[in-house]
Image: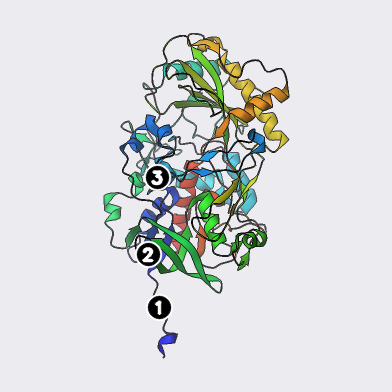
Amino acid sequence: MTSANVERRADADIVIVGGGSAGALLAARLSEEPDSRVLLIEAGEEAADPDIWNPAAWPALQGRGYDWDYRTEPQTGTAGRVHHWARGRLVGGSSCLHAMGYMRGHPLDFQAWVDATGDDRWSWNGLLPAFQAIEDHPLGGNGLYGKGGPMPVHLPTDEVSPVARAFIEAGASLGLPRLEGHNSGQMIGVTPNSLNIRDGLRVTVADAWLTPAVRSRKNLTILTGSRVRRLKLEGNQVRGLEVVGRQGRVEILADQIVLCAGALESPALLMRSGIGPHDILDAAGVSCVIDMPEIGRNLQDHLLGAGNLYAARKPVPPSRLQHSESMAYMRADGFTGTGQPEIVVGCGVAPIVSERFQAPAAGTAYSLLFGITHPTSRGSLRISGPELDDRLIIDPAYLQSGRDRALFRQALEAARTIGHRDELAGWRERELLPGTLNSAAQMDDFIARSVITHHHPCGTCRMGKDPDAVVDANLKLKALDNLFVVDASVMPSLTAGPIHAAVLAIAETFARRKILLS
C-alpha cells in the first residue's frame, strides 16, 4: 500500500465547535465515554471577570471584551433602531451574560417541535427526562423536577423585592394564578422567576458541567482563543476544520463534528464553508458547495417593551437578585384564561428603559416590561464575506407582522392595568411612560421606540421533516453524514419564555442518544 492510500487518523473522534451552553454541556457528557476523544473549540477564553457571578451586575456585562456585541440592521419595526445583541464569547457562552432565568416553556411550545419533526422526543414528555437530568430543583424528585443535576434552580423567597411582591399581588388580584415557578407545565400565572443561582451567585454552564474532575479527563481537550474559519468537505462528509488561533492556522481532522456556536455563528460557519443559500453565498464571494436555502432564515427573537415606567413614592431598594424578578404570563384577552401564554408582563425593580428614553436615577422608579411570547415575524442572518472578520448581517425583522403589533398593544395594556392596581399604590407615585396614548398608531409608535431584545435568538438551522429543513430530528445536517447542529439555531419556534433551559434540554437529549448509540 502506498502512503497516498494510508488514511490519516483523525485528531479527535468528536469536535465540538463552540463552548457556550450547549457545547460545554456536550463536552462534559460526551467525554464520559473514555474511549471517545473529544475536542471543544471556543473562540473566547475562560471566564475570569468576578462580576459574571454577581447576579445584580448582569446588565453591566454587556459590551465588555467577552461579549460579541453583534449589531442588527436598522429595524423599520422599531423606529429605525439598531439593536445590540449580547452573546457570550467565553467558555460558558451566554450563560455567563444572561439574566439567569430558568423556564422550560409550555407543553404546547414543544408540540410545535413535534409537528415540525414528526418525532415525539421533542415533546414536553419526551424532553422531561432531559430537563430532570439537568436540574437541581428544591422540589426535585417529585416526578416533575430534577434533583441533584448539575444546574441549580433557585426559587427566590425572602430576597424577593417588596416591589415585585406587590406586583405579584396585583396580578393575583386580577385573576392570575399564583405559581411556584414557571416550570410545572403551567405558565399562565404570576410567580418570582426561577433562577440559575446558588448561594447568591450565578452558576454558568461551565461551572455546572465543566468541573475540575471533568476538565482533568485525558480524553477531553478544551482549545480556547480559537475560531473555525471553515469546514473542509470530502464527498458527503466533513473531514477537516480550518482553525485560527494562538497556534496560527491549523487543520484539525475529526470523525464527527457538532456545531454549538449558536444561532448566529453556526449558520455563519456553514455559509463560509459553502453550505447555504446559493444567492447569499454568491453575494458574499463564497463558492456554493451545497445549496441549502433555509440556512440563516427563520431567525426569531423575543422583544420586551422597556418600559411602562413609574416614579416611586418612596425609595426602591436595590434588587437582591437580578432586577427583573417576576414574570406574569397570560392570554392576550384577559387575566383569567388558561393554556399557552400569548403575552408577558415582567416586574423590573429598577428604571429599565430603551436607549430612546432617559432613565431616572436608580431607586427612584421601577419598570413593568411587556412582550409577546410567540412572535410570527421571521428574520434572517447572512454573511457579508468569506472571512471571520466580515460582519454578520442580522435582520430580525422585528414587528413585521400585524399580529405581533396587535399582541404588543395588548401586552402594553396588560402592563398598565397591573401597574395601576391598588396593590402597587404604596410604591406608585405616578406613571412616567408611556403617558397619554390616544390611538393604536400612537401605541405602535411608543412600542417601536421602547422595545429591547430579550436575548433569545434562535431558529436559523431549524429542525424538521420537510425537505427544506436544515437538520433532521436527530439534529444531523441533512446534506452531510457526520455533521450535527446542537444549539438554539435548531429550534423551529420559540418557547414562551427564556430559551436557555430548552437549549440545555436539546443538548442533553442529543448527548443521551449519542451515548446510547456509542
Q: Nearer the viewer, residue 337 or 439?
A: 439
Which SS class for mark 2?
Answer: strand
User: Which quarter of the figure has residue 421?
Assistant: top right
Q: Which mark is residue 66?
A: 3
Q: Is residue 464 visible?
A: yes
Q: Which amino acid type is marked by label 1?
A: Arg
Q: Nearer the viewer, residue 31 or 74?
A: 74
- Tell me the mark number nearer the camera, choosing from 2 and 1: 2
- Tell me the mark number nearer the camera, choosing from 1 and 3: 3
Q: Which mark is residue 479?
A: none
Q: Nearer the viewer, residue 261 or 135?
A: 261
Q: Between disc 1 and disc 3, whose residue precedes? A: 1
How did the renderer colour the structure?
Answer: rainbow
In the picture, measured across the screen, residue 50 lies left or right of residue 430, that is left
State the residue at coordinates (49%, 35%).
183
**Alpha-carbon span between mark 3 and mark 2:** 21 Å
Q: Position of residue 290 (x, y in %)?
A: 61, 66
In the picture, measured across the screen, residue 443 lies left or right of residue 138, that is right
Q: Which amino acid type is marked by label 2?
A: Gly
Q: Which residue is mark 2?
A: 248
**Alpha-carbon span between mark 1 and mark 3:** 36 Å
> Compared to 321, does 90 lie above or below?
below
Which SS class for mark 3?
Answer: loop
Q: Is residue 179 visible?
A: no
> Compared to 66, does 218 lie above or below?
below
Q: Residues within 10 Å of mark 1 (few under 14, many from 20)?
A: few
Q: How many marks?
A: 3
Q: Which residue is mark 1?
A: 8
